[in-house]
Amino acid sequence: MITTINHDQLKRCLLLLWMADIPACIIGSVGTGKTTAVENMVKELDSKMEDKFHLWKVFLGLVDATDIGGIPNKSEDGKIDYMPPRCLPFDSNDKGIIFGDEYDRAAPDVQNAFNQILLGKEIHNNVISDNAYVVLAMNGESDTYTTPLSKAARNRVCTLYLSSDATGSQEDWDEWARENNVNDTIRGFAKYRPNLIVNDSEFTEQALITPRSRDMAGRILDTLEKVKFKTDDIVFPCLAGVIGTSAAHELMHYIEERDTIPDIKDVLDNPKEYTDYFDRPDLVYMICIAVEGYVDRIKNEEQKEAAARQAVSFFTEYMSPEIQMWAVQNIVKRNADIVTSKEYKKFFNETKELI
């Protein structure tokens, strides 16, 4: 089942993804406030920054491919360059959001042109500002005359599904209506008959699990440690937006189990007390990675080598041969001198048939 979010969650999801530099794609029914959410985000960031924070809004359903990629122009050396369009930021000092609205209404050649921005912030010979963040918006598959996201685009964005009736959405609208002086009768009627709101689009899972999307999930988790706003109700939607709902459920469970792992130095010093952990497939890889990280963080070279030898001995004694191979190789890559140690020789003798 697709996880939908309300406007308050969308605001925080966009901030988190902006900090992680992961393009967002907002999917929601017509009139649910996708454009307004992006405009409000730009206003808020602009008010908090010393430099101007811009919004470059492109209605992709109304433009041609040359409006995005630029018009061909013969240069002095006889080669073809492309004149950059004014609707996009090419000055390296430009900061802000490139908002590709109505992406699913764009012609295929326009989508392909805009996808170059998603791929590497570059169109033909023109380089987009590195300080520009990309957000797409689309109406969903139940709308007419739309083109779904291509696999290439799906694997480069975090898809966020904005609900018209998710918990909090009606309250969000009423607050917006009050601040924007919407007629009081309409506000009252909306509270009286909230069920008359248009039904959500039929959302279809867009995220794909690939090496790229796993990297995006990792950047989301890294960024969570830096933010100061509430994130407990947006972690799952953001992860699901890059690796899919099913994988996100498993990852969240994996994170919960990871937090049960004891102090890793104590595991190395007293492994017999933790053998129950070594029989759990969901924890054993995380334990090995934690050991690897423990060794990497040691600065003193002698202590680092001693810890690396201890790690190899631990892997040889308590891990299966297949896991030993992987874990020891990771240690040796950063601590090559230990191949002459007695610990490594023992590992080699016990696994040489597999090697």
Image (tube, grey):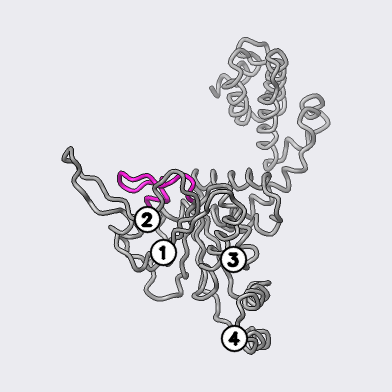
For badge 3, the amino acid type reads Met
* Residue behind mark 3: 1
For badge 4, the amino acid type reads Leu
* Residue behind mark 2: 114
Q: Earlier in the sequence, mark 3 or mark 4?
A: 3
**Do the numbered discs 1 and 3 sit on residues whose CB atoms are within 8 Å?**
no
* Residue behind mark 4: 196
* Magenta stretch in the rendered image: 115-132
Q: Residue at image x 39%, y 48%? A: 90
Disc 1 from disc 3: Cα separation? 24 Å
Q: Earlier in the sequence, mark 4 or mark 1?
A: 1
**Do the numbered discs 2 and 1 sit on residues whose CB atoms are within 8 Å?**
yes
**Do the numbered discs 4 and 2 sit on residues whose CB atoms are within 8 Å?**
no
For badge 1, the amino acid type reads Tyr
Q: Is residue 334 left or right of residue 228?
A: left
Q: Mark 4: which secondary structure?
A: helix
* Residue behind mark 1: 103
**Do the numbered discs 4 and 1 sit on residues whose CB atoms are within 8 Å?**
no
